[in-house]
Image (cartoon, helix red, strand yellow):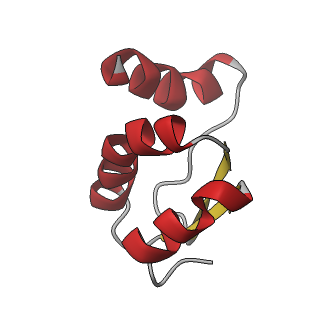
Amino acid sequence: MFDLGGSIFFFLPRLVGKKIPQDPKRILVIRLDSLGDAVMTLPALEVLQSRFPGAHLDFLVGENVRDLFALLFPDSE
């Protein structure tokens, strides 16, 4: 499932004519409201961190998963 999602994430900007920055400073992860969605997203977040090691991850998440991300990513906002 992640392979398809990852492919869509990295190839969608090419389809709409936008480029992914080679060295982004910040990455915003949006709308992880349920605990199951948040847990299933963790492998993708690990890939983002390894692909863009200098980028700062920020999260726009629901209140019910905020503590999970604060625990797993203490340097994020």
The residue at the point 31 percent across, 48 percent down is 47
Task: Answer left or right for 68 relative to 52.
Answer: right
The residue at the point 42 percent across, 75 percent down is 71
Task: Answer left or right for 37 relative to 61.
Answer: left
- Relative depth, front residue between 28 and 62: 62
Point out the image quarter for the C terminus.
Answer: bottom right
- Relative depth, front residue between 42 and 62: 62
How many marks are shown on the rendered structure? 0
The residue at the point 64 percent across, 16 percent down is 15
Point out the image quarter for the N terminus.
Answer: top left
- Residue 34, how many percent across, how many down? 61, 40
- Residue 24, how many percent across, how many down? 54, 64
The residue at the point 46 percent across, 55 percent down is 22
- Relative depth, front residue between 1 and 13: 1
- Residue 14, how many percent across, how many down? 59, 24
Q: Is residue 31 above or below residue 22?
A: above
- Residue 61, how many percent across, how many down? 68, 55
Considering every residue shown, the one lying at the far bottom of the view is 75
